[in-house]
Image (spheres, grey):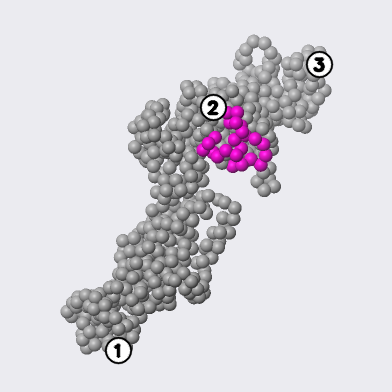
Amino acid sequence: MSALTLRGITKTFGTMPVLKGIDMEIESGEFTVLVGPSGCGKSTLLNIIAGLEPPTGGTVEIGGRVVNSVAPKDRNIAMVFQTYALYPSMTVRQNITFSLECRNVPKREREAAVARVAALLQIETLLGRKPSQLSGGQRQRVAMGRALVRDPLLFLFDEPLSNLDAKLRVEMRMEIKQLHQRIRSTNVYVTHDQIEAMTMATRIAVMHQGEVQQFADPDTVYNRPANLFVARFMGAPPMNTLPARIETAAGGVRAVVGKGEAAMTLSLPAACAMQAGREVVLGLRPECIAEEDRWFGHGGERVILELPVEMTEPTGAETIVLARLGGERTLARVSPDVRLQPGDRGRFALDMRRVCLFDPGTGALIA
Amino acid sequence: MLDRTAPDTMPAWGRLLAHVVVWALGLAFLVPFIVVVLNSLRTAQEIAQTSMIGWPESWAFPNYAEAWSQFCVAQNCTGLQPFMWNSAAVTIPATIVSTLLGAVAGYAISLWRFRGDTWIFGLVVLGIFLPQQVRLIPWTFVLRDIGLINTLAGLVLIHTIQGLSFTTLFCRNYYLSIPQDLMKAARIDGAGFFRTFFRIVLPLSPPILIVTVIWQFTHIWNEFLYGVTFTTGSQQPVTAALIGLNAAIADVPQYGVQSAAVVLAALPTLLVYLFGGKYFLRGLTAGAVK
């Protein structure tokens, strides 16, 4: 069943278009993440789904029912806010049951609902406390409890982890994902953090300038980004995007990056032959450029190149290397035991199976 | 708030100068009050024989009893007592009603944005800047037409409505610091206008309500112009009744009793300030929920 359908959603503030026609269909049980840089319209879209803001055009359907003129409380949704938005003067218990109280649910049922949610989130011992007596992670849990207590059709998350410190954020990320796997809720989750999107989503909608750039599963978004924006936004460090020219030669298809003496040639998969003769932007993830003796797996093109090293960033688990490929700045991810120094010429293995080609004019993925 | 942990960059002589100035100003404000309090504890003869300024030779506490229940103000020898009750009967309801209405109005303007809300707020606040005298004649018409001239209810009405400008301003500014997310959460939870107000906003309001109550109480209690204009005789609030003292002083100087009357009339606002003053200063600078 389709839990949420958006058709042609537009929003303008004054004369400024914020959303330019969003179409989206979200199935029941999906974990959809809306991700994009700040100002891309993702929070506005979430507010429109919640009914906290009216769209300028288009329709919102929740559970098969058009809800454009339905008040937020009657949309069968729950929302978790970035600031948690816990009612400061109420105890945790009262915070969780407030929505039930507003719906005149009998006290006995409210108690049962609190007990169920508190057990699920392991916050039984906090029920008597005020929000000011809770840590950030505990507040986050209570905010989730408040959403879970009503068992709504749709859960909306508005950057719920961005106020937590880095360690806690990773823990809560896992918990939210586990919770979703357990109760199979339908989640729409807004974040600017592409790692949250990759790790939690069943489907990611990458937004930019009021439009959905790509709406697909994390694997596709990461490996086959629909355009250059998605390629550069997803992944840390981002995908290398190098201007190149596609040529056919005796040995097959190849890309030439750079001009003159610095020019380098990379052999490409046969499927790229259709782009022969074109100027393109060649996209290659940093993890596809590694130390010379890295084994990428069976099949596919493997290219060995000697590249000048400009800088290294050891992270412990791996080392990010900034090198020049055909004169273009290029990032590689090498094993931490490869000790390269700035100024060295390092030998790198390139995994060309996962190369992406983009149209330099439109930015769209072409191969 | 003052940051008391900030490194002190002021030189020693500067600190000394600052202390001298502050103490001098404090004394300048306190001296008249101290003189009145001391005189309220001296007998009329003692004041007449020595001077207006002096330490009581024998503590004349009966001055207060006399001022409270026997002293003659404008030919009424009832003491200040009935006028004090009049003032209380005007000040207490007007303070409570104007504070509550201001809280609701400030809440509506700050947290339930609606078309034209800034204009309405501007008009409400304009009331602060209109001089009292300008409003006298319109109020005369209103009170006459609804039959409340020379009644305490008329004064309650005036002070409630005029107080709304200040109470709305205070509460609206305070409520602006309540995060919008809290309002969104309440909307999704299904709380309406008044449930959100009573369950979420009002419990966060004590700091600003204390400020507003102190402000309204002192202003209404000390108010004088409407009191003398719209009430006469036994209906007057204590500030208006005290004028009678002027006439009395010209006839028979009874400085002791008269000073006691003045202290009595000022006592409620002094007590409110003594008990609520620290909340007042705190509330003026506090944010709502951080």
Residue plotted at (44% across, 39% down): A102
Secondary structure at badge 1 equals helix
Q: Which residue is mark 2?
A: A186
Direction from residue A268 to residue A335 in the image, left or right: left
Residue A81 screen position, x and y as percent: 50, 38
Q: Which mark is residue A109?
A: none
Q: Are marks 3 and 2 on the same chain?
A: yes
Badge 3 is on which residue?
Answer: A249
Above or below, B166 relative to A95? below
Residue lying at the far left in this picture: please name it: B58
Residue A181, position as x, y percentages in the image: 50, 22
Q: How many residues crowd around disc 3 within 10 Å: few (fewer than 14), some, or many (20 or more)? A: few
Start-end of magenta stretch: A53-75
Give the Cα distance between marks 3 and 1: 123 Å
Question: Secondary structure beneath disc 3?
Answer: strand
Task: Give the Cα distance between marks 2 and 1.
Answer: 87 Å
Residue at coordinates 22% horizontally, 88% vertically from top-left? Answer: B49
Is B226 placed above or below B118 here?
Answer: below
In front: A190, or B180? B180
* Image quadrant in which you'd find residue A300: top right
Q: Is residue A66 magenta?
A: yes
The quarter in which the C terminus of chain A is drawn is top right
Residue at x-position 39% and y-position 31%: A109
In this view, B287 is above or below A27: below
